[in-house]
Image (tube, helix red, strand yellow):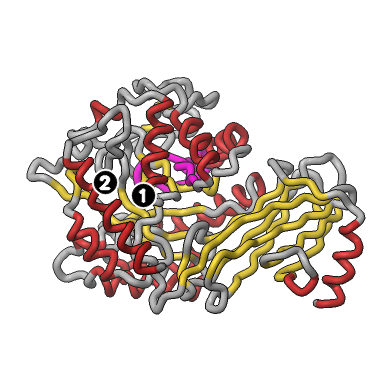
Amino acid sequence: MKNLSLLLGLLWSAVPLLVSAKNGISLTLIPPTIITNQVDLDIRAGLKNEDDQLKSVELAVYLQKEKPDNLLHYAKKEVAPGQSFEIKHVLATKNLVGKNTIILVVNDGHRSYREVKEIEVVESDIRSTRQIDGAWAGIYHWSETEGKHWNADIKKMTDDQWREMVRGMHKLKMDIIVIQEVFRNEEYVGKHSTTVDNYKGKAFYPSALYQDRMPIVAKDPVEAILSEADQLGMHVFVGIGMFAWFDFTRESLEWHKKVAKELWEKYGHHPSFYGFYVSEESGGNLDNWEHSEIKQMQRKKEIVDFFREFKTFCNNIAPAKPIMLATNSMQVPSGIDTYPALLQNLDILCPFGFARMPEGDLTGKESADLLQSLCNTAGAHLWFDLETFLFNEDQSLYPRPMAEIIRDLNLFQNFEKILCYQFPGVFNDPKMSIRVGEERTLELFRDYQRYLKNVIKKKN
């Protein structure tokens, strides 16, 4: 390895290095923000040959400095026109406490390109950082009942106010944003006749695929979120959905491919475009509550087939970009026969609902531990979708008391990343020009801000 590193250093020293903008080059760290030294860092690097001729490409990944002794991974491959190439390197962080730099250098025989990412590792005896690292941002809540206290407000937000909201998230170090969905279509698997061709959903962005638009003031909130996140060094999952809730059929797959392709072509130039979030969700049992055994097996096969093909498709158009799915945490043992195959093609599983497990099920902690073991075996990542809301009697949502949020942050110690559902309507930066939801959303913002300061003070 050392001789190879020396050779690469000599060869590449004569080739000018360019900072990669798009160029088909991608470097992704999973997780992307601060982690503890109990979590391994998953380094993904990839490229797509966007030329019309065969390329012989070399990829080299370095830690801290671009020196022979710091080489982590090297690969060389002939890549045909229109094809992609991806590598993965898992780095133990036990002895990497502090600021770390990951450097990707790609040589295509004519030019070399460089991508650089920073990651901070903190010392800990548990995997979790005990802080919320990101949040969902639903552009308009899917349920008028649940979103009763904020849908009227969020509908009025301008593109600039979406940028304000991104800045508010950044103040709380919620630097991973999950756009919940980019289309609205309230259908459910097995209860609709929707196809790619007759799809009636409404877009939250100027889509060329389907003409109907959601009646919101913002012209392109997706662009607003991504462009502001670019400025702040944040990371955005773009939600591919909604085709239909819990729907992983062949028709849904083809729709997801078309939408993912359009979104990548339209927004893939943004440095903050971190990955794809599949919005459809699923029950923890992965059979989506079908009653017959035949139907249960069908749903389980569908979700496995969906992610196998969707992962391959996304790897080709956007190499090294992870795919995430949120499931609930309930009835996980009923899906244990399917998780191993699913997780082979799902980079990040981000379950929710641990605080409201039904009677007779596992406890939230037991479900989290079981899911962690399944992810460990498959080499997938388990993140936590922390619910920062509670239900009123009429099923509308309101901000959860800070004491309960702190309880969950301390109870669930295995998650390498904690995201929350959601920021709009639950948290509100007092500096924003619009308040989305109730006044107590301001209180939760301030409460969490105080909590975060204490956490950071203890780490330092």
Residue positioned 85% across, 73% down in the render? 4
Q: Quadrant of the C terminus?
A: bottom left
Residue positioned 71% across, 48% down in the render? 25
Which residue type does callout 2 highlight? Phe
**Mark 2–mark 1 contact, CB under 8 Å?**
yes
Span colored in magenta? 235-255
Which label number is shown at residue 445? 2
Quarter of image, res 8: bottom right
Q: Nearer the viewer, residue 274 or 310?
A: 274
Count the marks: how many?
A: 2
Residue positioned 25% across, 63% down in the render? 354
Where residue 408 appears, as percent x and y from the top left, is 25, 64
Residue 236 located within the stretch drawn in magenta: yes
* Residue extending furthest toward the left: 393
Task: Describe residue 317's horizontal placement relative to residue 15 as left or right.
Answer: left
For label 1, the crowd category at 10 Å Cα-Cα, with few meaning under 14, some 14 to 19 and many 20 or more, is many
Which label number is shown at residue 172? 1
Task: Describe residue 146's horizontal placement relative to residue 109 as left or right.
Answer: left
Q: Quadrant of the N terminus?
A: bottom right
Q: Earlier in the sequence, mark 2 or mark 1?
A: 1
Up-down: is 149 above or below 134?
A: above
Up-down: is 210 above or below 117?
A: above
Residue positioned 26% across, 70% down in the render? 411
- In this orientation, does residue 287 appear? no
Where residue 237 appears, as percent x and y from the top left, is 48, 46
